[in-house]
Image (spheres, helix red, strand yellow):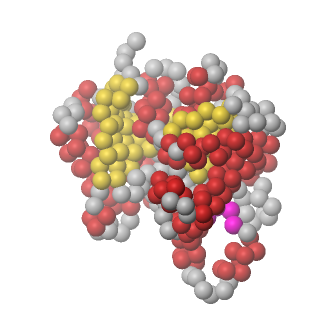
Amino acid sequence: MKKFRILTINPGSTSTKLAIYHHQESELEFNLEHDPIQLKNFDKTIEQFRFRKEVILTALQKEGIDLENIDAISARGGLLKPLVGGTYIINQQMLTDLKAGSYGEHASNLGALIAQEIAKEYDIPAYIVDPVVVDEFEDIARVSGHPEFERKSVFHALNQKAMARKAADELRANYQELNLIVAHLGGGISIGAHKQGRVVDVNNALDGEGPFTPARSGTLPTGDLMRLSSSGEYSPTELYKMIVGQGGLTAYCGTSNVKEIEEMIDNGDQEADLYYRAMAYQVAKWIGAASTVLKGQIDSIVITGGIAYSKKFTVLIKERVEFLAPVKIYPGENELKALAEGAWRVLSGREEAKIYK
């Protein structure tokens, strides 16, 4: 069996992560930090395309990477129309939507654009894998409580799907055969109910729905939020920043760094301890809610993301939810490996690439 070499590209707001994978094993990984002052020269994120592409090519050349020996490129998917999970061929319709920002602006929109341009030069395929807009909701999950509002699926689909497949491998089963709850714990937190290979319900992590996080306020009391929004004390932009970016542990403790908060707790800060435990409490409560979506038929609960490195935090969650199902912990975001695996499944014939329409 051929061992494919895959270049993975993951653009973030102030950095771009790259890796070369050979037969699903990492040969090289590095993180390119971008000067925020330089990025301010671009009015729109999409205008960073040429700049980021050149930074990537320069870094690859410096590392001695010959792109002639690459079989495919796999990039983080951006804000596109809602679609089912899987690996997608980058096509013209996708590029058009990303360039226009038809479904929103985000640094991840640059991934497919950069991947396609490099791939075209070397006549190799380019893909995206499980973008944040993966939408596999059952109709009942879309109902919010008022016809003016519809619940949306926006979450850490790439890592959630990858860790769900990893759990399935350990359970010696196919992902499509299992019911799993996956909690991604990072700057944003998403908790998905995976029903036989489809994420049929999940909180909208982009807008801060769900548990509060290191920097997001989570689902707030509606009445109090409405009263604050009409008080004139905050502009809509300021209010949104309170909810997404300056909420959660940042608002309570002055930092979004979980390690710093654990140090505060170790030094006797009782307030920090309360808010830290409250975040774990809310995560556990949303896992409990997801268990009802699956009618209690759960093969495993998976905890992943950067905060999953903290045994102190994961223990607080486990003690509340492990009565539901066995808990597996896979720390880290694992996105570069997930991108490589998505491309590998297509190249090896294990999965058919999907077409974006």
Whether residue 313 sits left or right of residue 198 in the image: it is left
Q: Where is residue 248 in the image (x, y as percent from the top left)?
A: 58, 63
Pick the residue in front: 69 or 10: 10
- The image shows residue 88, relative to residue 178, as above or below, that is below
Residue drawn at 26 percent across, 55 percent down: 51
Looking at the image, the residue that sits furthest to the front is 268
- Disc tally is 0
Where's the N terminus, which quadrant? top left
Q: Give the range drawn in magenta.
A: 216-220
Q: Is residue 278 magenta?
A: no
The residue drawn where x is 73% and y is 33% is 325
Above or below, 237 relative to 256:
below
Is residue 41 visible in this depiction of the protein? yes
- Tell me where residue 224 appears, x and y as whole percent: 72, 76
Figure quadrant of the C terminus: top right
Q: In this view, does 348 lie to the left or right of 244?
A: left
* Residue under the image location 76 percent in, 41 percent down: 291
Does 199 sit above or below residue 213? Answer: above
Tell me if 147 is positioned left or right of 83 in this view: right
State whether residue 191 appears in this view: no
Task: Characterize the magenta stretch by its predominant secondary structure.
Answer: loop
